[in-house]
Image (cartoon, rainbow, N blue to C red):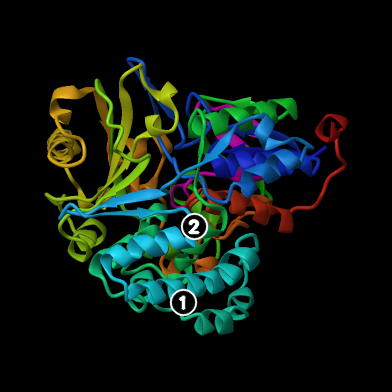
C-alpha cells in the first residue's frame, strides 16, 4: 500500500490525513506541537481553559463529512450547539448591534441604526449568495493549477464584480457607517483588510447565514480530540513533538521527510500543512522549485499578526455575549496602520471570546474564561514585543474595564499572551502572520500557492496559505481538493471498518 506522510496537524492536515486514509492510503502525520490541532491548541491555567485558536464554527457539514467517510456520526464524538447572537458588536459610542438569528432578527437590529438600510442589507445578502454559489459551492474544492482554469472563471468573476473590495461591496448597499463596519469585518476572520480584500470573500456573510454559527461543547479543542480519536480508530499513525526540517526529493519526486533529529521517513506521497511561504523558503531546496514560487514568495503580502491575551476573571459577566466585536474609534485608518504600517498603533479593535457564556466548564465556579484578540502588524514591522506586549496588555485591560467588563482590573487573573513572535516560533508562520498570505485578488485561486506543489511530483499543499484560503471552512476544503488530484488505492480492511 502506498505510504503517505502529512506534515502538520492543523485542521487542514487532519482532514487530509482522514481523506487519504478513506481512499486507501497508509497515513502517518507529524506535528511539532504536543497535541494535534495546529493553532487550535488548548491552554489551561489555574482551572481556566482557553481555546488558543479558532472559536467560530461555520459550515459544520465539513466536519460531518470527515466522520461520514468512515460510516461514523460526528454527533457521537463532539456536540455542536448554535449560538445566538452570533456576534455582538460594541461600538465606541456605546451602541451595540446583535448579529445572528433569523434574517428578520437582523433586519430588526438594522432598523435601530438606519431603517433605510433594510433594503440595502437584503440586496447585500443576495449579492453574497450569488458570490457564495460560485466561490464556495463550485470552486472551493477545485484545484487551480493552470492559467486556463483561472481564465475560465473570469466571466463569472467579472459578472459578480469580484474586482471590487469587500468594503466597496458593503458600502454600495449600506449607508450607516457603523453597519458598514459590522458587515465588512468578515475578511479579518481570514487575515484580510476589508479595504483590500477581493469581494469574493463577501461569500462569508452568506456562509454564516446558510448554516449559522456554532460552538463545540468543550471548545475547539474538543473537535481536535474527536478527530484524533477517529484517526486512531482508522489506523493513522500520529507523531507529536516531531519537527519536520525538510522534504526529501528523489528523481524529481517527493520521497519522504527528514526530521530535525536527522531521521528520514520514506513516503510515496507527501502532503504539507505547513505555511507554504515557510515550506518553500526553508523546507524545500530551491533547485526543486518551479513555476512562480520564487516571485510569489518575494512579492507576497502577508496577513496581519495577532496579539492574543488569555485570562480568567474572579467574577462573572453574564451580560457579555459569547462572541463580542469591540470596535475602536478608528476603522479604515487603524486597518491601514495594521496592514501597511511599521509601528504598533496605540489604539485597537478587539475580538472577545467568552466561552463560559455557553460552556461553564471553561472556568471554576463563579468565574469566567476569556481570550481577547487584537489584530496587529506582523513581524515585518519589527516591533519590540518584549517591550510592547505588556504595555498593549495593560491598554486592552484598561479599555475593557472602562466599557464592557467593569472592574476587570480588580478581577483579572491567570493572564498571559501570545504575539506574532510566538506564531513564528510555535507554528512556523512566515513573518508571524496569523493567516499566511493575505486574501487579495492577486493572491487567490491560481495566484495563490497551488495545492499541487510548484515543485516535485507527489508533493501537495493544504491549509490557510493555499487554495481556497484561511478559516476553518477554507482549510477543510483545501483537503477536499486532494480528492481531485490523488488516485484511490485499494482499501485496507481496517480503513473500511
Tell me the residue that label 2 is attached to.
Answer: 102
Residue 15, position as x, y percentages in the image: 63, 42
Could you classify mark 2 by the number of other residues whose Cα lies within 10 Å: few (under 14), some (14-19), or many (20 or more)? few
**Picture quarter containing residue 119?**
bottom left
* Residue 163 relative to residue 478: left or right: left
The dot on residue 162 is: 1
Q: Is residue 310 above or below residue 474?
A: above
Residue 131, position as x, y percentages in the image: 53, 72
Identify the image quadrant of the N terminus.
top right
> How far apart are the two marked residues, 2 and 1, measured between alpha carbons?
27 Å
- Could you tell me which secondary element the residue under label 1 belongs to? loop
Residue 493 shows up from this direction = yes
Between 415 and 378, the one nearer to me in the picture: 415
Between 416 and 379, the one nearer to me in the picture: 416
Between 33 and 156, the one nearer to me in the picture: 156
**Picture quarter containing residue 257?**
top right
Residue appearing at x 21%, y 40% in the figure: 404
Residue 162, position as x, y percentages in the image: 46, 77
Residue 146, position as x, y percentages in the image: 62, 71
> Which stretch appears magenta?
257-278
Q: Earlier in the sequence, mark 2 or mark 1?
A: 2
Could you classify mark 1 by the number of other residues whose Cα lies within 10 Å: few (under 14), some (14-19), or many (20 or more)? many
Amino acid at each position: 500500500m502506498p505510504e503517505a506522510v502529512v506534515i502538520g496537524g492543523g485542521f487542514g492536515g487532519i482532514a487530509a490525513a482522514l481523506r487519504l486514509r478513506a481512499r486507501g492510503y497508509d497515513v502517518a502525520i507529524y506535528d511539532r506541537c504536543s497535541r494535534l490541532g495546529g493553532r487550535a491548541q488548548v491552554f489551561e491555567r489555574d482551572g481556566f481553559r482557553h481555546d488558543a485558536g479558532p472559536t467560530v464554527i461555520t459550515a459544520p457539514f465539513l466536519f460531518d463529512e470527515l466522520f461520514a467517510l468512515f460510516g461514523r456520526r460526528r454527533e457521537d464524538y463532539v456536540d455542536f450547539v448554535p449560538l445566538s447572537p452570533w456576534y455582538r458588536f460594541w461600538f465606541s459610542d456605546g451602541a451595540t448591534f446583535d448579529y445572528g438569528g433569523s434574517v428578520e432578527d437582523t433586519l430588526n437590529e438594522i432598523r435601530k441604526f438606519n431603517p433605510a438600510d433594510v433594503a440595502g442589507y437584503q440586496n447585500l445578502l443576495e449579492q453574497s449568495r450569488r458570490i457564495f454559489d460560485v466561490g464556495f459551492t463550485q470552486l472551493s474544492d477545485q484545484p487551480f493549477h493552470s492559467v486556463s482554469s483561472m481564465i475560465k472563471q473570469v466571466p463569472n468573476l467579472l459578472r459578480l464584480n469580484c474586482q471590487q473590495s469587500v468594503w466597496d461591496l458593503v458600502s454600495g448597499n449600506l449607508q450607516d457607517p457603523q453597519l458598514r463596519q459590522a458587515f465588512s469585518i468578515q475578511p479579518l476572520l481570514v487575515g484580510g483588510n476589508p479595504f483590500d480584500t477581493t469581494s469574493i470573500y463577501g461569500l462569508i456573510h452568506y456562509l454564516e447565514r446558510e448554516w449559522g454559527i456554532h460552538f463545540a461543547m468543550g471548545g475547539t479543542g474538543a473537535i481536535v480530540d474527536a478527530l484524533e480519536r477517529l484517526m486512531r480508530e482508522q489506523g493513522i499513525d500520529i507523531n507529536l513533538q516531531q519537527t519536520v526540517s525538510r522534504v526529501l526529493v528523489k528523481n524529481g519526486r517527493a520521497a519522504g521527510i527528514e526530521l530535525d533529529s536527522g531521521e528520514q521517513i520514506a513516503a510515496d506521497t507527501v502532503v504539507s500543512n505547513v505555511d507554504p511561504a515557510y515550506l518553500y523558503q526553508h523546507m524545500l531546496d530551491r533547485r526543486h522549485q518551479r513555476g512562480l514560487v520564487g516571485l510569489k514568495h518575494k512579492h507576497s503580502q502577508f496577513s496581519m499578526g495577532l496579539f492574543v491575551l488569555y485570562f480568567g476573571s474572579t467574577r462573572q459577566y453574564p451580560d457579555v455575549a459569547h462572541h463580542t466585536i469591540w470596535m475602536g474609534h478608528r476603522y479604515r485608518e487603524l486597518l491601514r496602520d495594521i496592514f501597511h504600517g511599521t509601528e504598533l498603533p496605540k489604539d485597537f479593535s478587539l475580538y472577545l471570546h467568552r466561552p463560559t457564556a455557553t460552556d461553564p466548564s471553561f472556568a471554576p465556579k463563579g468565574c469566567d474564561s476569556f481570550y481577547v484578540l487584537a489584530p496587529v502588524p506582523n513581524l515585518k514591522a519589527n516591533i519590540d514585543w518584549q517591550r510592547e506586549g505588556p504595555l498593549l496588555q495593560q491598554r486592552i485591560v484598561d479599555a475593557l474595564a472602562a466599557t464592557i467588563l467593569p472592574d476587570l482590573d480588580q478581577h483579572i487573573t491567570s493572564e498571559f499572551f501570545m504575539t506574532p513572535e510566538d506564531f513564528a516560533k510555535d507554528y512556523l508562520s512566515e513573518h508571524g502572520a496569523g493567516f499566511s498570505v493575505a486574501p487579495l485578488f492577486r493572491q487567490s485561486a491560481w495566484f495563490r500557492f497551488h495545492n499541487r506543489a510548484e515543485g516535485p511530483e507527489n508533493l501537495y499543499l493544504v491549509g490557510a496559505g493555499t487554495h481556497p484560503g484561511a478559516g476553518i471552512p477554507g482549510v477543510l476544503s483545501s483537503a477536499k481538493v486532494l480528492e481531485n488530484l490523488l488516485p484511490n488505492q485499494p482499501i485496507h480492511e481496517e480503513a473500511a471498518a
